[in-house]
Amino acid sequence: MEFLSALFTAAFDSNVVFAQMVGMVAVFLLAFKPQDAVRFGLALWAATSISGLVGWPIFALFFEPWGIGYMAPIAYVLVSSIVVFLYGAVTCTGKSEAARARIMTQCTLLAVNACVLAAPLGNAAAGEATTLAVATGSSIGAGLGAFIAVVLFATIRQRIDERLVPGALRGLPISLVTASLMCMAFSCVAGIAGGLFA
């Protein structure tokens, strides 16, 4: 039950993009076509989940016992980058040159994405109260929340008819309005998903 509660809380109640406002760059820059958003969202989900799963033992077994928790963000940046580029190297296997270049560009965007860093930092912020089940659930849930945010925003952005939007609101302004409405929608249902398994 701890795992499911942490998963749904991280994915919906405290969504890393719309509730915590982390990783909005991925939503604005890459959420244009739903097909591309699904591909990038899956990669973001995998990178965030793996980064959180690798980062928690590092904190629990090394930083916390030694009392050097302040070093965790530096280590997580390195761990997240290594995880993302290893993921990219595995994904590039057997692909054409153009596909490899696209995947490595995507990996560069993933490595600097704040969502990938937010999962291990969130697990570390919970401290001693975090068990392996909670850390796993919150890591996978943070990735799922980022995936949902990117795909939902791309779908909504595609449905906005730019001809009906006033000239002053076209482009980035209507995207900001849409993102703020989605943030309000996620904050309105906060507490419901995680409470199902309490």
Image: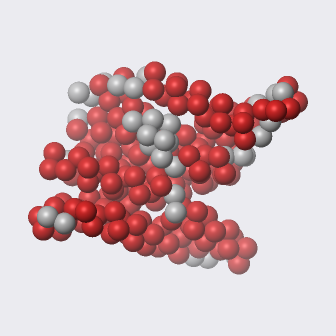
The quarter of the rendered structure image containing the N terminus is: top left
- The one nearer the camera, 184 or 143, is 184
State how many labels appear.
Answer: 0
Viewer can see residue 144: no
Residue 104 higher or lower than 44, as above or below: below
Residue under the image location 72 percent in, 41 percent down: 172
Q: Residue furthest left?
A: 65
Where does the C terminus fall, quadrant-wise? top left
Q: Is residue 1 visible?
A: yes
Q: Position of residue 112 (x, y in %)?
A: 52, 63
* Residue pictured at 52% horizontal, 49% vertical: 23
Q: Residue furthest right?
A: 163
- Answer left or right for 115 relative to 7: right
Visual colour scheme: secondary structure
125 or 39, nearer to the observer? 125
Where does residue 76 sit, x and y in percent of width and height?
A: 35, 65
The residue positioned 45% from the left and 26% from the top of the image is: 187
Q: Is residue 104 left or right of residue 12?
A: right
19 up-or-down from 136: above or below: above
Residue 4 location (% of width, % of height) = 30, 37
Instruction: Out of 15 and 97, give the one closest to the viewer.
Output: 15
Q: Quadrant of residue 80?
A: bottom left
**Left of 10 or right of it: where is 156?**
right
Image vertical order of residue 187 relative to residue 7, above or below: above
Residue 101: image quadrant is bottom right
Residue in the image at 72% along x and 46% along y: 33
Between 133 and 142, the one nearer to me in the picture: 142
